[in-house]
């Protein structure tokens, strides 16, 4: 059995499509809405799945463990765990019922029958006895496709070179999240948010850290009326806005419980936001918000809550 190296996943930078004049230097892949996973296959028939944080999430997805016996040789692969809706689109809300079950194998097995997970593979970073991280994207992609990993529980979706605008429009029409553009000559940069990978979404979104909240009024008394959110900047938590829309009643109640459990006395932001009746919390809760644009100071304009991100830790947000 080969001792596999621990590999921190390469991350994409939010941006726009590369210029049409150079788009033949880029490949375009569908952006999936799921949980990032590095897949470790030591060659003995087993498989270990690790989240972006490095946590072992294998027990949460029992249907994916057979990948080790299918491939039959040592490898480390990069991919995304998704839950598909009736139209075959990744649905993060469905996947949330599967996340966080690594410590409950019996419940994970039951949920696997109700909401099956699917592993989308998009990179090969180690194979046999050799690291592939120093190879250009095109060579790594050829290696991955030659593995022939397509089935009910996992697949290797195709990538297209050039035609970025068409690829983006196709994902919009299909109701998908967007595309990831990857420079053909790019190496695999361990743990780096790289400009060689650019994610282009159909709506602007940001991962934020909750540092406080403002109680609602009337029927919302005791529940969050707005969340005060920030982003890490040079080690400090910088306030980027107040989010007061986008929740269902159930989500608001869930957030209230999480916020109450994280109460602290001091403001965690580097500058105290101007928010009357603000209550402060440990900056450990990560969420995703939609927004229209940003001000010059970096504040989010017209933000609305999209979802919790239990798969991300505050240190992941930069």
Image (cartoon, rainbow, N blue to C red):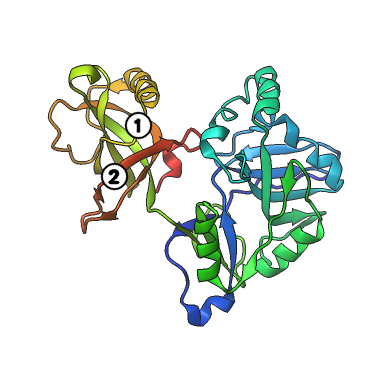
Residue 58 locus on image (x, y percent):
68, 32
Sequence-wise, the earlier of marks 2 and 1 is 1
On the image, numbered disc 1 is attached to which residue? 247
Residue 95 in view here: yes
Judged left or right of residue 266, residue 70 is right
Tell me if mark 2 has few (under 14), some (14-19) or many (20+) residues whose alpha carbon lies within 10 angstroms of its own.
many
Judged left or right of residue 7, residue 246 is left
User: Residue drawn 33% across and 45% down?
Assistant: 231
Q: Place residue 279 in its image quadrant.
A: top left
Residue 13 locus on image (x, y percent):
46, 58
**Residue in the foreground of this view, choosing between 82 and 76:** 82
Q: Does 116 sit above or below residue 205? A: above
On the image, numbered disc 2 is attached to which residue? 303
User: Residue drawn 62% across and 65% down?
Assistant: 187
**Residue in the foreground of this view, choosing between 270 and 317:** 317
Judged left or right of residue 120, residue 307 is left
Residue 136 in view here: no
Quarter holding the N terminus?
top right
User: Residue drawn 31% across and 41% down?
Assistant: 304
Q: Does 246 sit above or below residue 238? A: above
Q: Does 174 sit above or below residue 93? A: below
User: Residue drawn 64% across and 33% down?
Assistant: 56
Give me the C-alpha separation between circle 2 and circle 1: 12 Å
């Amino acid at each position: 059995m080969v001792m596999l190296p621990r590999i921190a996943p390469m991350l994409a930078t939010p941006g726009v499509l590369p210029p049409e004049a150079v788009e033949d230097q880029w490949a375009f892949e569908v952006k999936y809405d799921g949980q990032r996973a590095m897949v470790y296959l030591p060659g003995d028939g087993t498989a270990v799945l690790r989240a972006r944080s490095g946590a072992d999430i294998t027990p949460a997805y029992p249907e994916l463990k057979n990948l080790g016996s299918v491939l039959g040789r040592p490898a480390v692969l990069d991919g995304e765990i998704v839950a598909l809706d009736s139209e075959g689109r990744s649905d993060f809300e469905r996947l949330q019922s599967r996340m966080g079950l690594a410590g409950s194998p019996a419940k994970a097995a039951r949920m696997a029958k109700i909401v099956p997970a699917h592993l989308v593979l998009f990179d090969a970073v180690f194979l046999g006895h050799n690291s592939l991280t120093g190879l250009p994207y095109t060579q790594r992609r050829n290696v991955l496709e030659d593995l022939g990993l397509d089935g009910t529980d996992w697949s290797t979706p195709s990538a297209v070179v050039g035609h970025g605008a068409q690829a983006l429009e196709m994902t919009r029409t299909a109701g998908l999240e967007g595309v990831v553009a990857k420079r053909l000559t790019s190496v695999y940069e361990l743990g780096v948010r790289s400009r060689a990978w650019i994610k282009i979404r159909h709506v602007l979104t940001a991962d934020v850290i909750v540092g406080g909240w403002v109680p609602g009024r009337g029927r919302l008394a005791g529940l969050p009326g707005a969340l005060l959110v920030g982003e890490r900047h040079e080690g400090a938590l910088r306030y980027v806005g107040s989010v007061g829309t986008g929740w269902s009643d159930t989500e608001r109640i869930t957030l209230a419980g999480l916020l109450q459990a994280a109460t602290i006395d001091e403001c965690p932001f580097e500058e105290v936001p101007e928010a009357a009746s603000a209550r402060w919390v440990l900056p450990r809760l990560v969420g995703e918000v939609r927004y229209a644009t940003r001000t010059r100071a970096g504040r989010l304009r017209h933000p609305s809550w999209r979802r919790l991100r239990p798969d991300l830790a505050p240190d992941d947000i930069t």
